Amino acid sequence: MVFTWDPAPAGDLGPTPSGSEEWQGTLIVYTNGVAAATNASAGYAANIQVPADVPSREPADLAVGSYNRASGLTEEFEGDIDEVALYNNVLLSPDQVLAHYMTGTNSHPATNYETLVMTAGGELATPPIPERVTLPATYLRFSEPAYFPAANSGSLGYLANGSLVLTTNISTGPVTVGFESPNQAVPVNGTNSWVSLNNPSGLNISGQITLEAWINPDAVATTTNGTNVARIISHGPPTPTFYDPNAFAFTLSGSQLSSNEVFLRIEAVTNGATYVNYVVGTSDGTTFHGASSAVPGAVLGGGQWVHLVGTYDGANWKLYRNGVQIASAVSVVGALPVSDAEWAIGATGNGWGDFLSGGIDEAAIYGTALPAGKIKAHYYVGQSGAVSLSIVRNSDGSVTVTWPGGVLQQADNVGGPYTNVQVSGNPATSPYNTTPGTRKFYRACL
């Protein structure tokens, strides 16, 4: 889309209440390179001065995708915007507009799109072309990488990279034997900062799932944002819209229509008294499926980092805090599929609300349910470093093996092969007593 406005030679309509001069001229709108509509008497006054009648008001600012800040930031555009250019005292010709469109849609253009935009004013100037004067006053390509990228270290690699929104990884994460120093984390302010993961296809997870993070929530984690919910990791929920589909000719779809979501969050519940809960689960907008557990002492904060994990294993939603299971709920409904919505850390899926206040580190998303032993091992290693076994010989010739986390494995030879140690069909739990007279080699598998 291109809009051009050309003031009429005698189109001066005089000053406006803000002190700017209003002019009448011809406004033309082009869509896909072709003029679609014309208004030969369109008035325009540049917002360049503070309105004389309101001394405290500032000059109107420029916004892309909504009304400007001075006008209340309303009328949000829903969709995508790219390659925004504004020219001052330059009127693009119909041929130029068509050329820009043709170049932008041609996979093998003779001249690239950026060059055409940057030289359009020069094509209309009288030679010699003054250096830089004919450049567009503003050209926003929106193609820069995130200034503070959140690099993914998981199996999806760069495809699941995110970006830090109104925050940086400048705070200190868990300081323990298990984390390298310095261990940086992301501070989120409960108002407008979060981490965007977008919506990579590899994270379209349904059924079994694990959401994991180290968090250091402020004591006001569920009140700073003005709601009773603070999201740690979230896929969805649907993006709210200010537009009424009954009044405008468009159809809601994707993240605006789907009510499904998956989340790991903190929420405050008032029932005579206020309770603060950890929650993992999924929702279709009406029915919640998941598990919750009260925050110990109903107090958040204190500068203490907490390892929080939520899983669905095909039969149960479970919550773990610092390696210990704290909640379980039977459910036939696992993570519901979420259509075209985004993933986020510290907010809703695209950052429109429910912001967490505090610190977040080491966030991970799995398309399967981690077993309890692995979750315990993650917490132990994070706190204490590498897992070590303790083997004590007993008087009857047996030994007692203890280990802090993971799955105990055994082999007849030090080089293996190793198999999981089973007791009555279940993985062995620490401590484990061996049968007298047997000789085995043991290790803990994380």
Image (cartoon, helix red, strand yellow):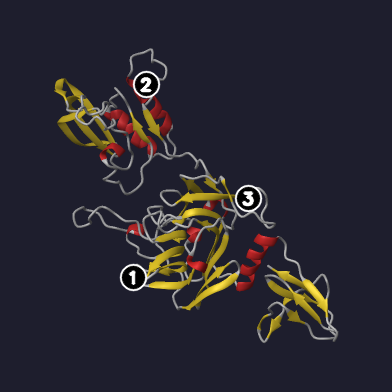
Q: Earlier in the sequence, mark 1 or mark 3?
A: 3
Residue 26 location, quadrant: top left
Residue wearing tag 3? 183
Q: Earlier in the sequence, mark 3 or mark 2?
A: 2
**Would residue 57 be found to the left or right of residue 284 on screen?**
left
Q: Which residue does the image show at 18% across and 25% down from the upper left? A: 22
* Helix, strand or loop under label 1: loop
Q: Which mark is residue 286?
A: 1
Element assignment for label 3: loop
Mark 1 neighbour density, 10 Å: few (under 14) some (14–19) many (20 or more): few
Q: Earlier in the sequence, mark 2 or mark 1?
A: 2
Viewer-nearest of labels 3 and 2? 3
Front position in the image: 107 or 249 = 249
User: Residue type at mark 1?
Assistant: Thr
The residue located at (48%, 50%) in the rendering is 188
Secondary structure at badge 2 equals: loop
Q: Residue at x 32, y 61 (%)?
A: 257
**Alpha carbon distance from label 1 to label 3:** 40 Å
Residue toward you, 8 or 271: 271
Looking at the image, which residue sits at the far top?
A: 128
Residue 182 location, x and y as percent?
A: 65, 47
Give the left or right position of residue 52, taking residue 202 as reference: left
* Amino acid marked by disc 2: Thr
Residue 128 in the image: state x and y as whole percent.
38, 12
How packed mark 3 is, by other alpha carbons closer than 10 Å (few <14, some 14-19, many 20 or more), is some
